[in-house]
Image (cartoon, rainbow, N blue to C red):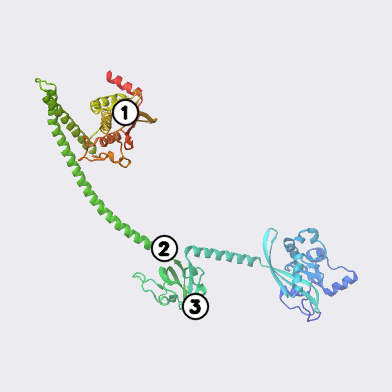
Amino acid sequence: MDGQSKGRPNDILNGITEAPVAPEKKHTLYNIADQKGREAKGSDLPSDDQLTNPGSATSAATETDGNFIPSALVERLPPMYHADRDRHLVFRNKEFNDIAQATFPEFRSQERREQRNPLAPFELREIFDRLNAGEEVVKLRQTAEINGATRHFRSTHFRIEEGGELIGFGGIYTDVTLEAEAVMQSAKSEARFQDVIRSASDWVWETDHNLNLTYVSNRIAEALETPPAELAGRHLFTIGEFEESPENGSARPDLAVALMPFRGRIFLMPDKRRQGRRISMTGVPVFDEHSGSFTGYRGTGTNVTRQHEIELRARKTQEVLESSLKELRERNMELDRALQEARSAARAKTDFLGKMSHELRTPLNAIIGFSEMSIQQAFGSLNARYLSYFRDIHGAAYHLLNIINDILDAVNIDSSKISVAPRAICLADVVSQAKSIVAVRAEQSEIDLSAVEVSREWAVIADPDRTRQILVNLLNNAIKFTNSGGSVGIDVKATNRDTVAFTVWDTGIGIPDDQHHQIFESFHQVDSNLLSTPTEGTVLGLTISRQLAQLMGGEISVDSTPNRGARFTVSLPKANSRDVAEQDLDSYS
């Protein structure tokens, strides 16, 4: 063959052995000239079985230029093929058939694989087009599933020429499975390493022995807003310095002399906007494994700027809270002192009012008793003028006694000395008793009490004496603020299965909306006060009534409009009328 020929058939073997073939022994797969001669003579080329199954009896060796390639060598050849210029596969070994079956859809058919000199698959024909278009060599990477295992190949495809004339195409597949798996494993290890670095720190850095940065990871751009490439070659202390502290030392220690590792040192780095960044730096010195000489530092950095800002805010907040807590404690101490003084004053007031009430009631009882005896003329007859005087004295003394009793009740309620004994009672009995108490006053004021009636079906759980006191207070209040010719009455209803509400209503002057809550305060009267009241009384009746109702588990509310009367509703726990009957029977027995 011409020594200047390009891409001859023996190039396939040369691509494997990478060794020159001696001119006198050209071990090509087969001789193309012989092939043409055989085709002209009608003789057959070696069959596929002879070429692709070198272990068979008919293919103990493959003939090339009168010589043969031993079958043991054919068995060890890498996957390869040879196609003629008409793109038919004239040679392919078994290893190539395995790849073709796995990667070329056309060769998945056994019938196609067993054809003699079949047309090359579409994928190879595209490669041949690229070679004819001017590419000298086409190199590809391919992955195939062969016998249940994943294998990776690097293929090289080229033109075969003889005397400058194209006579075919060749291809050799190199198994690079181990190399590919090593690369993939390395990539996984690198990814795992990067994940660990990202989870443990923000960026990685490395310097040479002069502390010039030789490597910084991409994450540093987030902290400094500077591309890592701009930092390469710069001295470590040109991008920042350590925070000085008595424990760690100066801001720019001579690390190249100290050769000591450090951990968690705060490195202060300004970004492009000159805003400071706090980086928690960790570094270790690196030494050459052969000479032992110092080669630089390597370490990591974590941006703790935000954490530091949060800590500062938390510290300031803590200082404010501590200051507020101190002030609050001082005020609480002042309040405690004031409370103690108020309690002492309240006890003194309670004791004083209690003693005064008892001291006043004794002579008042005597005045009431003697005036009653005089009115009854127990010691002899009196003229009309004296009887009138004694009646005035009796009325004034009785009124004063009621005032003292109200004050004493208010004092006892404030000091929690008053007690109640709730039980099932008939509301009609208590209403009847209260009506009889205020009847004389209503008659004198020409107030109609005919509507003050309650059915005996209504029963409540309450203290009978305190309930009667509430009713007397509400009825007296209604009579007091109702003009002559007016009316006072009582309505009863069940607000729910557990509560009974009775309402004392009148046709009096009414109460403005803005005073509905104030009327329950001590010494408050509608449109007046204690010093200028146009009606008699301490104005404690509503205050005492509400407190008594609350002690019995109830409440008092008001609904009123000026000049349209008022409605005071008392809510108390509901009782069963059967319980009232049983109590009456027990009392009788």
Q: Secondary structure at mark 3?
A: loop
Nearer the camera: disc 3 or disc 2: 2
Quarter assignment of residue 172: bottom right
User: Quadrant of the image for the N terminus?
Assistant: bottom right
Please give the label number shown on residue 139: none
Left or right: residue 25 compared with residue 393: right
Quarter assignment of residue 435: top left
Residue type at mark 2: give it.
Gln
The correct choice, above or below, for 381 with respect to 220 in the image is: above
Left or right: residue 217 compared with residue 71: left
Q: Secondary structure at mark 1?
A: strand
Nearer the camera: disc 1 or disc 2: 1
Mark 1 or 2, nearer chain start: 2
Disc 2 residue crowd, few under 14, some 14–19, many 20+, Cα 10 Å: few
Residue at the (30%, 56%) spot, across then down: 324
Residue type at mark 3: give it.
Gly
Q: Pick whichever, 274 or 209, lies toward us.
A: 274
Please give the label number shown on residue 233: 3
- Separation of marks 3 and 2 at Cα, in angstroms: 30 Å
Disc 3 residue crowd, few under 14, some 14–19, many 20+, Cα 10 Å: some
Left or right: residue 125 compared with residue 297: right
Q: Return the residue at label 1.
A: 489
Residue type at mark 1: give it.
Gly
Q: Pick whichever, 65 or 387, lies toward us.
A: 387
Q: Return the residue at label 2.
A: 307
Mark 3 or 2, nearer chain start: 3
Position of residue 480 measured from the top left corner of the image (x, y, whole percent): 25, 32
Position of residue 219 measured from the top left corner of the image (x, y, whole percent): 50, 68
- Separation of marks 1 and 2 at Cα, in angstroms: 74 Å
